[in-house]
Image: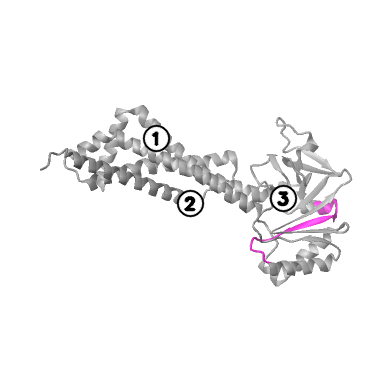
């Protein structure tokens, strides 16, 4: 195989010497296609996750609303009792949130987490969206922009905001929220209010009906009067959205792979004189095909890696959650390379048959 790759490298170098602009355009097209293949797949997953996190689809949430405001101590006792039970050991509470409306009519959420990824508590983030917010950041708040008369030209993160006599550092600004006007950490909520009108318990993804019934029994011991909403196992709008979204992007990927195949077909046509010379000097069809495959490995492999790295770089400007795993790379590269390999072998075998039919070597 060394000789094959040596010949291939010489061919690529000769092509570049003959047609520099065309070669650069060809490589740029390959890189863009590789980037879009990776980007389309990862962005489809990201949009599905974003939809699920912003709507709660696919997340088991137990929602409880007592008939009247109750102390946050009751939520602490419920969580402590659940944690000590067998079901609680198997299905620990992932996150928890409590709510109250203040005298200004603002809906305040006291949460164990403040995260742009789990934007179900907020809405579209316009500031602070590049990271999760940690209790280590201090006494912080994520705030609905309408309470700041927010515009795109404002930079409010790091500013002080007073809420019900307490000062908070603004660590995030969001808009278009129909649920909460402010989100603070649970411990700060307890100190500032101490009461709640409702709360959520966000459970692990494998939370089942048996565990749900056990949790309901515990909650009813502490809150005998009120309403409760349990997670359901039916197909959610989030799952439907995710399937639809991935189908759309899969069609885009199919078009891109087809375009890449056309690029290689173009490459073979431009290199027809070179392959003809190989045939005339006595190379076997298998050797010519192996040279074309080596070209595929060098050109497609190199440009695909560059496109993949560009995709990782773009994540910095879109979202740190635009995840691309090694499995995604292997799957995307493997499937695309397999399609390209079949196209290359088919093209080169057809080309060699045409050489044989026209009897270029003048054999018998």
Using the numbered discs, state the Cα–Cα distance from disc 1 to disc 3 in whole angstroms.
48 Å
Q: Earlier in the sequence, mark 2 or mark 3?
A: 3
- How many angstroms separate mark 1 from mark 2 (CA)? 24 Å
Residue marked by disc 1: 27
Foreground tag (1 vs 2): 1
Q: Do tag 1 and tag 3 residues touch (Cβ < 8 Å)?
A: no
Q: Which residue is mark 2?
A: 326
Relative to 320, does residue 210 appear above or below in the rendering?
Answer: below
> Is disc 3 placed on a helix, strand or loop?
helix
Q: Is residue 190 magenta?
A: yes
Q: Label 2, label 3: how many angstroms apart (C-alpha)?
A: 32 Å
Look at the numbered discs 1 and 2 and tell me whether their residues touch, using CB distance below 8 Å.
no
How packed is label 2: few (under 14 Cα within 10 Å), some, or many (20 or more)? few
**Stretch of the chain drawn in magenta:** 189-208
Residue at figure coordinates x 58%, y 38% from the top left? 317
Residue lying at the far bottom of the rendered structure: 86
Q: Residue furthest front?
A: 357
Mark 2 or mark 3, whichever is nearer to me? 2
Query: What colour scheme does the image use?
Result: one colour
Taking the spot 78% from the left edge, 52% from the top edge, the residue there is: 110
């Amino acid at each position: 195989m060394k000789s094959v790759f040596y010949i291939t490298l010489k061919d690529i170098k000769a092509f570049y010497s003959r047609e520099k602009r065309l070669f650069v355009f060809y490589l740029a097209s390959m890189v863009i296609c590789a980037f879009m293949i990776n980007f389309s797949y990862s962005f489809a997953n990201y949009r599905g996750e974003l939809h699920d996190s912003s709507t709660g689809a696919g997340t088991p949430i137990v929602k409880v609303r007592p008939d009247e405001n109750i102390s946050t101590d009751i939520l602490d006792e419920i969580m402590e009792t659940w944690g000590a039970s067998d079901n609680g050991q198997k299905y620990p509470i992932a996150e928890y949130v409590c709510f109250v409306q203040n005298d200004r009519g603002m809906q305040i959420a006291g949460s164990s987490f403040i995260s742009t990824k789990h934007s179900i508590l907020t809405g579209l983030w316009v500031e602070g969206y590049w990271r999760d917010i940690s209790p280590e950041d201090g006494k912080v708040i994520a705030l609905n922009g309408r309470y700041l008369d927010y515009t795109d030209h404002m930079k409010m993160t790091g500013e002080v905001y007073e809420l019900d006599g307490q000062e908070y550092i603004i660590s995030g600004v969001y808009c278009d929220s129909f649920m909460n006007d402010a989100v603070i950490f649970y411990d700060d909520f307890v100190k500032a209010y101490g009461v709640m009108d409702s709360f959520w318990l966000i459970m692990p993804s494998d939370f089942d009906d048996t565990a749900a019934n056990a949790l309901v029994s515990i909650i009813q011991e502490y809150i005998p009067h009120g309403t409760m909403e349990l997670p359901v196992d039916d197909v959610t709008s989030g799952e439907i959205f995710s399937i639809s979204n991935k189908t759309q992007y899969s069609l885009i990927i199919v078009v891109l792979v087809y375009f890449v195949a056309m690029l290689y077909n173009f490459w073979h046509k431009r290199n027809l004189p070179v392959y003809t010379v190989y045939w005339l000097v006595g190379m076997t069809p298998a050797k010519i095909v192996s040279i074309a495959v080596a070209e595929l490995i060098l050109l497609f492999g190199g440009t695909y890696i560059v496109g993949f790295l560009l995709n990782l770089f773009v994540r910095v400007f879109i979202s740190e959650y635009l995840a691309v795993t090694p499995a995604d790379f292997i799957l995307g590269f493997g499937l695309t390379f397999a399609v390209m390999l079949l196209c290359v072998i088919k093209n080169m075998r057809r080309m060699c048959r045409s050489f044989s039919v026209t009897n270029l070597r003048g054999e018998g």
